[in-house]
Amino acid sequence: MATAAELNFTRPLHCLRPMLALAALALSGCDSWIERPAGPISSAERIIFLDTLAIMLLIVVPVIIAIIGFAWWFRASNERARHLPHWSFSGRIELVIWSIPALVVLFLGGIAWISAHDLDPGRSLASKRAPLEIDVVALDWKWLFIYPQQGVASVNRLVVPAGVPLRFRLTSATVWNAFWIPKLGSMLYCMYGMAGTLYLQADRPGVYHGLSAMISGDGFATMHFDTQALSDAQFQAWSVSARAAGPALDEPAYRALLKPSSEVSPYSYRSVMPHLFDAIVLQRLPPGPGGASKP
Amino acid sequence: MSTSTDALPPGALPQGGRPVDPSHLGHRNDATAAEREYTGAGAGGPAPKRIVVGYGFWIFILSDVILFATLFATYAVLAGNRAGGPGPHALFDLRNTAEETVLLLFSSFACGMASLAVARRNLLWTQVTLLITGLLGAGFLVLESGEFARMVSRGAGPTHSAFLSAFFTLVGCHGLHVTAGLLWLGTMMAQFWAKGFRQNIRHRFLCFTLFWHALDIIWVGIFSLVYLIGEVLP
Amino acid sequence: MHLLGQLSWQAIPFDEPLPMIAGGVVLLCVVAVLLWVWLKGYVPYLWREWITSVDHKRIGVMYCALALVMLLRGFIDAIMMRTQQAMAFHAAGYLPASHFDQIFSAHGTIMIFFMAMPFMIGLMNLVVPLQLGVRDVAFPTLNSVSFWLTAAGALLVNLSLVIGSFSRTGWLPYPPLSELTYSPDVGVDYYCWAIEISGIGTLITGINFVTTILKLRAPGMHYTRMPMFCWTALASNLLIVAAFPILTVSLALLLLDRYAGFHFFTNLGGGNAMMFMNLIWAWGHPEVYILILPAFGVYSEVVSTFSGKPLFGYRSMVIATMAICLISFMVWLHHFFTMGAGADVNAFFGIASMIIAVPTGVKIFNWLFTMYGGRVRFSAAMLWSLGFMVSFVIGGMTGVMLAEPTADFELHNSLFLVAHFHNVIITGVLFGAFAGYSYWFPKAFGFVLDERLGKWAFWLWFIGFWVAWAPGYVLGLEGMTRRLQHYDVAAWRPWLLVAAVGVLIILAAIIVQVAQLVVSIRTRASRRDLTGDPWNGRNLEWSIASPPPPFNYAVLPHVENQEPYWDMKQRALEAGHLQTPEPAYGPIEMPRNSATGFVCAFFAVVTGFALIWRIWWLVALGLVGAYATFVRFAWRDVEEQVIPADEVARLERANRAARSQALAVLAERVPTP
């Protein structure tokens, strides 16, 4: 379980966090996970990022000022500065300059340990709702989203209900990709022959940008997709309409999908062959053929 | 003139105006020159050529050990990935491995004899022992290539599974090193014959013996971690 | 079996204007330079004094020259990438994906392997034996082999521009993308063979310098009297010896997959691509410390010289350096937190990565306190160092942020990551290279570079870097991933435009640096360094003439302190004359020149090219040729040349006269303590 409130273990930095977030907002002026995270995972990661930034800035800013200050004050033309031409050792200073970074690292290390466990991608989210299962297959060069509970599939568009935990199983039918919806949270590699588990959740309806974060060939830049978070009713409506129209994702259709193509407009399948994802992971279906040098 | 620097305030200079031990490492101003110089830490000036050559070659051998360590690690990770094909138990012939080991060990022994012959500047015995070293090493390679050929003909070549790729590469890399060693050995024999026991040729021979013995040690690792463990595990 | 393997006229991209024009221009320049050299009669001089030289100073200069040329090549790639991304919003831009992918792959490969590594190795070559007070490195001919093998690798990478194509997988060839199925052309092969060949050269350098630093030092120089640059050189070369075999194996396994159908990392046959990640990053992380440690050494030298004070906290600097050396082998997994190794593993490596920031931070503080109480002179080298200190702490900070696994889950492979490593590599390694270049140029060539242009170059680089890469941090937080040939997110566009402006500022900086070199050479008569000590330096390299005689020291100095030259100067100032009496000059034996390195590298290029294009008979020929070269080298009877005593005396007396003169000048300037 990992809610934003539970990961709020750095109270003293409460005042710094809004300031930093404001700075980030001013800088980017737009919609990113840093200012307006759209889910519990990205919210928690945002806190960790800003806390780490704040602690590090506490050291970095005085150091930068000291560097410029010392260089300027002790410039050769400044007669007023102390001149210590042989001073090159001080035990007290050594103690301080080893201790301060060590203490900071100790603190940040604690955050690393706790948050790595709390925000482990495969860790289920605390929620009253049962998770929605989505199987993700990275292909050359599009995304296939299979909804085993609804019996439909979608290409290059991810439709999800808001407020419901999403349990993604990730794999690739060809080369590695990385499944990433920045506003919702963590990315995870999609690897052939492996099934990675990733939990995310969209807290409110909206459209969120999704992309692949690992170079996968010439069509890589076209592997972006929209994540549409809908209300429960709208999601039900969508899955009903998806079951009503569109082709069937049977084995020939899947093999056709394996052929390299890019800039694929989103569409959906009205039915999916059973255990398709497992067949891909267990290598009962062949991998993508590759070979095409132009998308 | 014995001055302790501990009593001086930081940054101040002792008599003579020159800071001794500015980093508080414990150097004393009153130590004799000899005491100051001898630390056993190479402060006696550049080492003689023989030491430098040997040391450099040891560092090379260290890097080669890391190379083999990487191959061992790869083998360890991939040994279970048989892609439905045969595993070590079905493929390894321990008798063959034992014969290879004997040949290699005796070849190292012959190499040791060659070192003694070189120390005695005896050209005949140098060449004889080096020839024996080479023949035993070549025998090892014959047995190993035979093993590889047999495995390939049984459909268990390196292209069949990750386990086999790792096996062939690890053992094959060692075999390649032995082959290179034999080339080097031939060159050394020719050099001794053509130029005698000149100092730099003896330095190179020292490096060759280090190389040859190191290959022996790697082989011990291979037959333990690959062959013996392969026999024991399912 | 075709006589030329897979090579045919189709390998030359006649239908693609960009590589054809680029290749044509480069070919023209190369031919023009070669013609000019030949017509002016410089070939015998170049052959005798540079190409076959085994002198560490010459080899060091050649390494740095290679690095500077490759900096230009890699930078052109950078300009192309920035302009493409500035243009390619809801548009295709001018670079199709197959080109764009080659360009970012070549950019990273060239900058790391053929710019940053040669630059650092070049500086170490030039300076370490001088600072240790000895005549050359442990294995001078192997040193030449190292350089020429590196150059061979660089040549192969550049050949891919016009014959075939380069890798499209990025600067590290992750499988399965780099396997034959998904990269069927020769690009990945060019990459692998170029790196394997130059990797042999680098490994030999590592062995050479570890042996030199540990076994060849002037009498009296125990470890605690070694200059800081030599300590960092030692740590860096220990890392080379330990890490480069891992790179060699990783790429060899990939090559076996591609050439012989093995199954190390393939999708089928039980291959495990995750193994490649672990292997390549087990090398990759020590590699970045191999790059930064010598730069840290440069900063130690420069900051202490231009503050007029000894380096603060020498002992803890040494401990910090060796700690970095050791811990750098324990952090590699932070390059793939998102591979899903689990919380325990991720947390361990995240914490280890933060721990390595401690000794790095200690170094920054030590440089800070070196300035405290000093008299800081703002030469170009010092400006590079200050620019580094201010910028690197930010790069280090973002590194610690990336070391938090959960933050990395949102930042991995984004432009935040790319900005971080450009931050630490440009302001860390490259600024250090430029500082070392400014600082030691007079020692190598006998005249000082134009300081004014040097300062201009610094400010343009510093501003240009931040304009180019501060947007990168923002873009990463906006959710932009790296290596995108085109994009549709409007929010990213303004930042990419700013970044393009930044790269233009850096272009101006590079133009100023070229101008600085040209102007300085033209006016070198007026900027001669006659004393050998233009900066009032503290270590032994400043005690000999600029440029030094081939044997460096007529008599090896006897070292009694840290900063031995400063010590010598102070004693001479007190006494009013040079302290060491004129020695009894004897003849000096130096290693003879050898064409082994050059010829061996020629065969390496032939073998590499033949392997790439599967021309097997040529591979055999190349290997035989390389072996024959070594046998021929082993067969020579005369290994050394003798510099007669009177020549030694002449050179040394000139040096002593210059130093007496410098002493007089110093005595006027510096009040006696």
Image: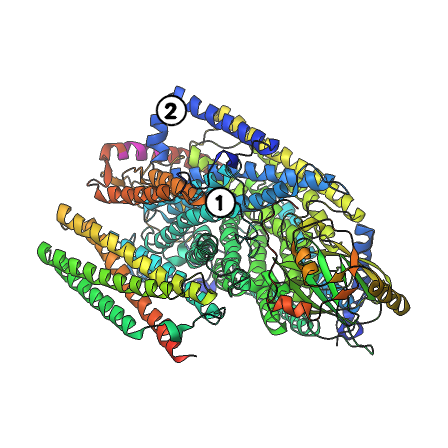
| Badge number at residue C538 | none
Image location of residue C8, percent across then percent down = 47, 36
Residue underneath mark 2: C42
Image location of residue B217, percent across then percent down = 30, 67
Judged left or right of residue C498, residue C602 is left
- Within 10 angstroms of label 2, few (less than 14), some, or many (20 or more) residues? few
Image location of residue C565, percent across then percent down = 41, 46
Q: Which residues are magenta?
A: C648-655
Q: Is residue B192 something one can see in this rendering?
A: yes
Q: Chain of mark 1?
A: C
**Which residue is depicted at the point 65% across and 66% down?**
C405
Q: Earlier in the sequence, mark 2 or mark 1?
A: 2
Q: Residue C242 falls in which quadrant of the image?
A: bottom left
**In terms of depth relative to the viewer, which is nearer, A215 or C48?**
A215
Q: Chain of mark 2?
A: C
Q: Quadrant of the C terminus of chain B?
A: bottom left
| Badge number at residue C190 | 1
